[in-house]
């Protein structure tokens, strides 16, 4: 679900801003998009209400990224027993003019798969950002 729609309180808005800042700190040329999904019936059917989705767009196509846009989906699980909500993983999909170029999932092996994967340097930075994002959402409130 669009990050702009998930920012329903100050704590969530602050965490979403932290994610944007973490990404932009490593990749300052990226432009954030808190509404990466269109608001039409077909798209709404595909959107996961248990995720926070943030898009990032780059000027041109980077040789190290091998893409033009990146969608970060932070996946959550609501535990019905203790009513807690926690981030369980992150999916990152990168797109170029042909469609999806590559995908990284922290759910299983933390590996990048696709037709045109980014450089090892970018891969390392992305994995570090994923670890930081999981910390942001799963750290107990002070």
Image: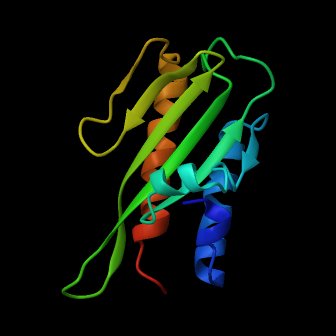
Residue 77 percent location from the top left of the image: 31, 68
- Quadrant of the snapshot with the N terminus: bottom right
Residue nearest the observer in this picture, 16 or 37 = 37
**Image quadrant where residue 50 sits:** bottom left
Q: Residue at x 29, y 87 (%)?
A: 83
Q: Residue at x 47, y 42 (%)?
A: 128
Please state if 29 lies on the left or on the right of 91 as rendered.
right
User: Total of numbered circles in the picture?
Assistant: 0
Residue 18 percent location from the top left of the image: 64, 62
Q: Residue at x 36, y 76 (%)?
A: 85
Tell me: residue 97, above or below residue 94.
Answer: above
Tell me: residue 74, above or below residue 95.
Answer: below
**Image quadrant where residue 15 sits:** bottom right
Residue 81 percent location from the top left of the image: 18, 86
How is the structure coloured here? rainbow
Q: Residue furthest left?
A: 81
Tell me: residue 46, above or below residue 142.
Answer: above
Q: Residue furthest front?
A: 41
Please state if 103 lies on the left or on the right of 20 as rendered.
left
Residue 136 percent location from the top left of the image: 49, 65
Q: Residue at x 49, y 50 (%)?
A: 73
**Image quadrant where residue 44 sits:** bottom right
Residue nearest the observer in this picture, 85 or 45 = 45
Please state if 137 lies on the left or on the right of 30 as rendered.
left
Tell me: residue 79, above or below residue 61.
Answer: below
């Amino acid at each position: 679900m669009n990050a702009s729609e998930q920012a329903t309180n100050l704590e969530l808005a602050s965490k979403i801003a932290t994610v944007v800042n973490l990404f932009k700190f490593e990749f300052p040329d990226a432009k954030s998009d808190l509404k990466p999904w269109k608001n039409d019936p077909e798209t709404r059917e595909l959107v996961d209400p248990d995720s926070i989705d943030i898009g990032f767009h780059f000027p041109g196509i980077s040789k190290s990224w091998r893409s033009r846009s990146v969608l970060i989906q932070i996946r959550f699980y609501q535990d019905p027993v203790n009513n807690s909500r926690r981030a369980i993983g992150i999916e990152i999909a990168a797109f170029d003019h042909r469609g999806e170029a590559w995908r990284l999932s922290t759910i299983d092996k933390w590996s990048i798969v696709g037709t045109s994967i980014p450089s090892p340097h970018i891969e390392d930075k992305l994995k570090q950002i994923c670890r930081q994002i999981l910390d942001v959402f799963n750290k107990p409130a002070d």
